[in-house]
Amino acid sequence: MSPEEPQPRESSSRGQTSRIGSIRPLSVLLAAIVTLTQVPVASAHGTTGSGGLSQGHGVILALVGAVILGGFILLKRTDRITPTTALYGVFVGIAITALGAVLFEGLSPDPTYTASSMPFPRAWYQPLALLSGLGIMVASFVVGWLRWPSRPRYTFLGILMGLWISYPYLLPELAGDTHPLGYAIVLGTPILIGYVIWKDAGGVIRAVMRDPVARRFGIGVGVVLALFFVTVTGYLSFFPEEGFPQKVTVVVLPAIYQLVSWPTLEIAIPHLPLIHIPFFLALSPGQVIVVGMLSALIGLNAALIARHWRVEERAGMTEGTAGSAAIVGTCTCGCCGPLVAKIAVLAAGPSIAAPLYWVFVDSASPLSAVFIVGSLLLFTGSLLYSVQTARQPDQSAAIIPAD
């Protein structure tokens, strides 16, 4: 995957590509958001405002985005359009799909469930967390020793992810929320993942990022999914809620997010200037770390695929990474449980949705941590695998991974 390879196919459509390339993907997304915010929405979830916007419109918008996404991929595969044009179309499809999912989540009634609807008792949480965490640590040690003896960083990353899952039950409950080990696990994860990527894929990623289209596509996908994550989890909201403050409120409160307690900045504005819609934002270091890791990994995968498309290489499994990153990232992240539950309510009723809701939302559930850890490992492994399969024998040593 040499970044210096010529791109003959694009020369024949230079005018069309340059016109589309001049459109900034984030500008398209922001314009769509601003347009939709002009439509009066409900005074509470699950109702319809004077503009007639409802959860059904979110479903339609998501379907339209999916059609656009699939259509541009199909057009690219059949050589009807250039790879650059396809990338911009794919990004627009991803952005519209994410926006539709956000509208669906924000305008759907919030389901309520009782403890009796839990799929299994909380007494199972401790053995599940300890067994799954210990299993990941042992498997990481064995596989790392046999498969990658010269790369102990893989083993250390697996052990750290096992600790992430089992940590809540390793310490007394009162001390666990503020114990230094918990903060070390969360803060150490992006450092170790960053080191692994820098060591084994840094040269290739730097070469990929020199392609302006691939760089814009990767950054755009990462930003869209970051906004999606924080919106569907309620940390960013433009929808009115019952009990919303009637004046501008800014507070800092402690809140548990991913293993330990973090100071959380909460901003509530009843009416944003000009567009007259409510605004709520909650930010904490833990949230920034987790969402930042997921979005950055997905964005890097997307940039790598964009570069493959641009140089017209046969990417094999790598070709599907950008699409799978957009889909799997939104489904495997444990914080997306409320959205999954609401979709299940719409499709199959509350009896089936309740177990899903508890599995994703209950902060004590080890399965929520498993989804987070699985997402991080999935996207890191996908990125490293893509880099390895993209290597060519005649490539410069500057872009050959270490070891």
Image (cartoon, grey):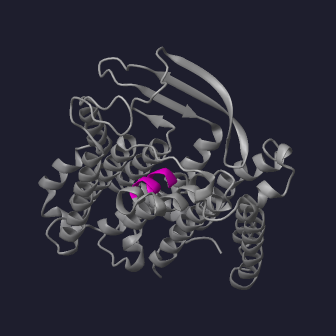
Residue at 65%, 59% in the rendered image? 369
Residue 200 falls within the magenta-colored stretch: no
Relative horizontal placement of residue 158, taking residue 231 as reference (left or right): right
Comparing 164 with 315, the one in front is 164
Comparing 81 with 399, the one in front is 81
Comparing 280 with 303, the one in front is 280
Q: Which range is magenta? A: 337-343
Where is residue 42 shown, x and y percent of the image?
32, 32
Comparing 150 with 123, the one in front is 123
- Considering every residue shown, the one lying at the far bottom of the view is 146
Main SS, magenta residues: helix
Q: Quadrant of the N terminus?
A: bottom left
Looking at the picture, does residue 401 appear above or below residue 356? below
Residue at 68%, 53% in the rendered image? 191
Where is residue 358 shown, x and y percent of the image?
58, 56
Residue at 37%, 20% in the rendered image? 272
Q: Quadrant of the C terminus?
A: bottom right
Where is residue 142 shown, x and y percent of the image?
76, 81
Where is residue 189 shown, x and y percent of the image?
68, 55
